[in-house]
Structures are given as C-alpha cells and as structure tokens.
Image: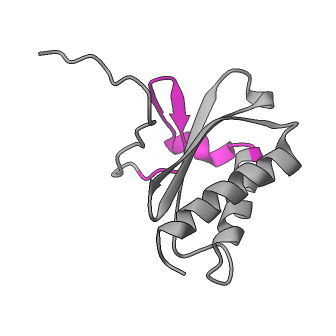
C-alpha cells in the first residue's frame, strides 16, 4: 500500500496512540496530512512547559514491514520521548520548535494558521 491512504492511517494511529498511551505526557495541538508521504504534528510535552514542538514524519519506508500502522506507533512514541540530541538541530519558527527536520528542508506550514504579514 503506497498511496494517500497511508498518510491517513499514519495520522489516525499517531493520534490514537498518543491518546491511549501518552496522554499524561503529550498534549496534541494539531496533526495534519502534509502530503501522501508525510504527516505533521504540533504538540507539547508536559515536562517541557508551554513550548510547542513540531515534527514531520515521512514515509515510506515505514517503521516495520511496509506497514503504515507501525509508522504511526513509532511516531507517537517519538513525541513522548525527551528531545535530547534533536535540540542541536532544532529550528524555531512562529513559536514552534521544529525537530528532526533536515536543515535543507523547508519547515512545514501549519494549516489554518495566519501567514506572516507581507513586507511589500
């Protein structure tokens, strides 16, 4: 299965796993399907206070056996883990600390969020 339904599966499993297993640690602010091959999340870890954290999860490959469910489970676990070394390459934009996104990649755009004012 390598189509847009994979992103829907990853997103659903990510949300469900956090709710079922990590709700005492992670507060989800927003999840969205960025493309057929990526899902993004903005969240807070209760141990990190009010800091918004953002991540993009790209696939394939999936975490295990070409299974999008495994990617959603793995992504949920990533949100609950301390940021550790990810902080070294984190980028702050519009109040969100984006982690695990290569420096050459554009940061995700959060849907339904006002864009920065133009300087024309």
Q: The C terminus appears in which quarter of the rendering?
A: top left
**Residue depicted at 44% across the width and 36% down the height:** 111
Position of 16 compared to 120: left or right? right
Q: Nearer the viewer, residue 58 or 89?
A: 58
Position of 18 compared to 20: left or right? left
Is 23 located above or below residue 120 in the figure?
Answer: below
Q: Is residue 93 magenta?
A: yes
Is 96 located above or below residue 64 in the figure?
Answer: above
Give the extent of the magenta segment.
Answer: 80-102
State how the image is colored: one colour
Q: Is residue 63 magenta?
A: no
**Residue depicted at 36% across the width and 51% down the height:** 105
**Residue depicted at 54% across the width and 33% down the height:** 97
Outermost residue to the left: 120
The percent coordinates of residue 25 (x first, y second) are 83, 37
The percent coordinates of residue 117 (x first, y second) are 27, 16
Q: Nearer the viewer, residue 92 or 64?
A: 64
Position of 60 compared to 109: left or right? right
């Amino acid at each position: 299965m390598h189509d847009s339904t994979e992103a829907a599966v990853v997103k659903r499993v990510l949300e469900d796993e956090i709710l079922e297993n990590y709700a005492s640690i992670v507060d989800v602010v927003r999840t969205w399907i960025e493309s057929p091959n990526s899902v993004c999340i903005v969240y807070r870890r209760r141990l990190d206070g009010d800091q918004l954290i953002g991540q993009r999860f790209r696939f394939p490959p999936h975490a295990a056996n070409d299974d999008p469910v495994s990617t959603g489970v793995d992504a949920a676990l990533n949100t609950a883990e301390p940021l550790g070394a990810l902080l070294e390459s984190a980028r702050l934009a519009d109040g969100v600390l984006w982690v695990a996104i290569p420096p050459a990649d554009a940061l995700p755009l959060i849907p339904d969020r006002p864009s920065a004012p133009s300087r024309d």
